[in-house]
Image (cartoon, grey):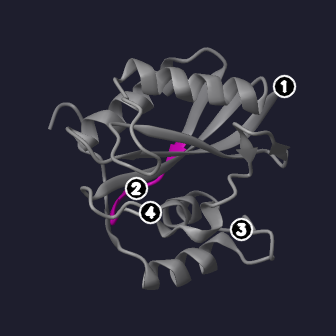
Amino acid sequence: MAHIAYLALGSNLGDREGYLRAAIARLEEAPGVNLLRCSRVYETEPVGVTEQPRFLNMVVEVEAEGTPRDLLALAKRIERELGRKRRRRWGPREIDIDVLIFDDETVDDDDLKVPHPRMWERAFVMAPLAELAPEIESPDGERAAVLAARLAEKQGIHAPIRLRSETE
């Protein structure tokens, strides 16, 4: 059975667009995963550790076979393949892929929490997610589109862009 899931992708080191494109390509090639839609890309200010370069962030919608843990394993494998180096928490990274939502399932393990617990606080997640699923509601019942607009006013999120294709 296929499940609808949303993944957050982010990069703030090196060829940021290149890392996002490469992650998307690997998702498209992954067995049991069908990439449905991609949000636009947002340049955003870092959160947590603020002394680092700006991020490019986006959200993708996929249809995935298996479990949330299977999708997490795929995300971590793609990060490794693209050369992500583990640094300090919330620090700079080549590529970051987080499982945000997996159907209406809830997972509360040490290494996987679905829905992602901090997504509702972050404009860099909510703005692109609201493009794809404006009707999704936070735990307190606020729709993604409303929450994204409110968060974007307070947090450093810049105009959305489209990824350049490889031929441009």
Instruction: Name which of mark 3 and mark 1 comes first in the sequence.
Output: 1
Instruction: Name which of mark 1 and mark 2 comes first in the sequence.
Output: 1
| SS for dot 4 | loop
Crowding near the residue tagged with mark 1, few <14, some 14–19, many ≥20 C-alpha atoms within 10 Å: few
Contact between labelled residues 2 and 1, with CB atoms less than 8 Å apart: no
Horizontal placement of 95 versus 109: left or right?
A: left
Q: Amino acid at mark 2?
A: Arg
Task: Find the distance from the CA under tag 2 to the CA under tag 4.
Answer: 23 Å
| SS for dot 2 | loop
Residue that badge 4 annotates: 48
Near-viewer residue (137 or 163): 137
Q: Position of residue 55 (x, y in %)?
A: 32, 55
Task: Find the distance from the CA under tag 3 to the CA under tag 1.
Answer: 23 Å
Residue that badge 1 annotates: 1
Crowding near the residue tagged with mark 3, few <14, some 14–19, many ≥20 C-alpha atoms within 10 Å: some
Task: Find the distance from the CA under tag 4 to the CA under tag 1.
Answer: 37 Å
For image coordinates 71% across by 39% down, the residue present is 112
Q: Amino acid at mark 3?
A: Glu
Residue that badge 2 annotates: 40
Q: Amino acid at mark 1?
A: Met
Horizontal placement of 36 versus 58: left or right?
A: right
Magenta region:
37-45
Near-viewer residue (129 or 35): 129
| SS for dot 1 | loop
Q: Quadrant of residue 26?
A: top left
Instruction: Name which of mark 4 and mark 1 comes first in the sequence.
Output: 1
Contact between labelled residues 2 and 3, with CB atoms less than 8 Å apart: no
For image coordinates 64% across by 30% down, the residue present is 72
